Image (cartoon, rainbow, N blue to C red):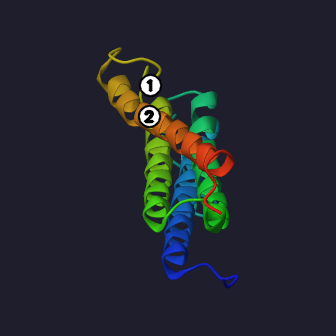
């Protein structure tokens, strides 16, 4: 056995790294929204001028949306780094890869509802239309990450292949 990961694993690592980078960029872009919220205007130095506009939302909502992109992007990179150590078949690694990618995107998209729309924190089903949409995006991702982490724990601790 060689120390370099097999071709399918390498492809899955590249997918995780690429999507991790895009999720990070999403977090960076949301960070501009956070700055504009804090400033109470849209201003991009060194571009002259600004637009006096107070973005909706709260400090906590903008901070969390920004951090969701950062944390989920780095989480995808961490998964890419440890992927060769995961005790799954090639099909299992493919499912794990796409599961984590979908989870990351669902979480960052759902997190943006709170700062942009009033009363859309996704804490409960049915409060209003936007809250329900955010809920329906966010909660499957939460259940998905719990299932994936439990599967990793089970396969790693109680059902090791080698």
Above or below residue 44? Residue 57 is: above
User: Dot 1: within a 10 Å radius of its alpha carbon, few (fewer than 14), some, or many (20 or more) residues?
Assistant: many
Residue 57 or residue 15, whichever sits in front: 15
User: Dot 2: within a 10 Å radius of its alpha carbon, few (fewer than 14), some, or many (20 or more) residues?
Assistant: many
How many callouts does the rendering have? 2
Q: Residue at x 55, y 77 (%)?
A: 10
Above or below residue 121? Residue 95 is: below
Q: Quadrant of residue 87?
A: bottom right
Can you give x and y, in whole percent of width and height, for residue 140 in the image?
Answer: 41, 35
Residue 62 or residue 13, whichever sits in front: 13
Label 2: state its secondary structure: helix
Task: Point out the tag, 2 or 1, that comes first from the N-terminus.
Answer: 1
Q: Quadrant of residue 6?
A: bottom right
Q: Quadrant of the C terminus?
A: bottom right
| 31 horizontally vs 138: left or right | right
Can you give x and y, in whole percent of width and height, for residue 77 in the image?
Answer: 63, 62
Above or below residue 80? Residue 43 is: above
Q: Which residue is mark 2?
A: 138
User: How far is the residue under mark 2 from the one under mark 1?
Assistant: 7 Å
Label 1: state its secondary structure: loop
Q: Residue at x 44, y 34 (%)?
A: 138
| 105 horizontally vs 46: left or right | left
Report if residue 93 is visible in the image. Answer: yes
Residue 41 or residue 105, whichever sits in front: 105
Q: Quadrant of the N terminus?
A: bottom right
Q: Which mark is residue 122?
A: 1
């Amino acid at each position: 056995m060689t120390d370099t990961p097999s071709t399918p694993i390498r492809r899955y690592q590249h997918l995780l790294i690429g999507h991790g980078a895009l999720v990070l960029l999403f977090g960076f872009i949301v960070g501009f929204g956070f700055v504009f919220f804090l400033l109470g205007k849209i201003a991009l130095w060194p571009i002259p001028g600004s637009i006096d506009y107070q973005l909706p939302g709260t400090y906590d909502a903008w901070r969390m949306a920004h951090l969701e992109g950062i944390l989920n992007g780095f989480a995808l990179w961490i998964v890419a780094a440890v992927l060769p150590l995961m005790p799954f078949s090639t099909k299992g690694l493919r499912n794990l890869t796409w599961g984590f990618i979908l989870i990351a995107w669902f979480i960052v998209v759902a997190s943006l509802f709170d700062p942009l729309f009033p009363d859309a924190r996704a804490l409960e089903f049915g409060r209003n239309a936007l809250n329900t949409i955010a809920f329906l995006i966010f909660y499957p991702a939460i259940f998905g990450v719990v299932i994936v982490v439990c599967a990793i724990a089970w396969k790693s601790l109680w059902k090791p292949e080698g």
